[in-house]
Amino acid sequence: MLHDLINIVKACKKGDQKSQKLLYDIFSPRLYGLCLRYTNNEHEAKDLLQESFIKIFDKLKQFKNQGSLEGWMKRIIINTAMENFRKGSNVLLYHSDAHIENVQLRYEHVLEELNSKDLLQMVQSLSPQYRAVFNLYAIEGYNHQEIACMLGISEGTSKSNLSRAREMLKKKINQEVNIKFTQVI
């Protein structure tokens, strides 16, 4: 498979459309999941995936077969998502919302009933700035300094947005757990 992938990438670098389709077919299902985490819905995720693959094919000649091709592609998707985020947001990312009450999760045994689709929808329901910081920090593993540079914000704003995103997710999870708990009773 690795040898085949190397040949597919070589052909893509030469502009072979059949190979580009093959590469897309191999990686798009996995990369689509990443796109979903940075968008509000499936339509936006598909747009992000398409836009990212255009960049991937355009920049593929820069890939030197060092490291993971999938990791390189993920980086392009994340960068594209951050570019789109910056274009759509001309406002300061720090919001002086009222302090979000610290919610303690109860009914932990019901948490097991939450599935990945429920959790994805909760993340997607966050505001774009909170979702971006949450994904970059909690999912992708970037630190606050890197996030601040990527989003053009201060480290303090990154930390604040992450804290608020976590509290909002806790609240949403708690609400969902309470709903499921009352259904069990």
Image (cartoon, grey):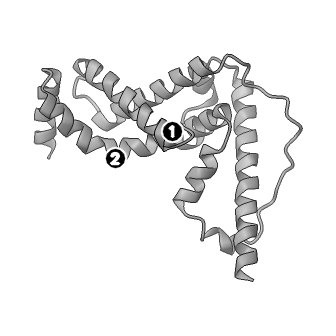
Front position in the image: 55 or 62: 55
Farthest residue to the bottom: give it: 185
Residue 23 visible somewhere in the drawing: yes
Label disc, if present, on residue 29 of the rendered structure = 2
- Residue at x-position 71% and y-position 46%: 166
The reply to whether residue 68 is visible in this rendering is: no
Check disc 2 and give the amino acid type. Pro
Image vertical order of residue 6 relative to residue 57, above or below: below
Relative to residue 9, is residue 166 drawn left or right? right
Q: Nearer the viewer, residue 171 or 21?
A: 21
**Amino acid residing under circle 1:** Glu
Front: mark 2 or 1: 2
Q: Marks 2/1: CA distance?
A: 18 Å
Q: Quadrant of the C terminus?
A: bottom right
132 vs 34: above or below = above
Percent position of residue 83, x then y: 51, 20
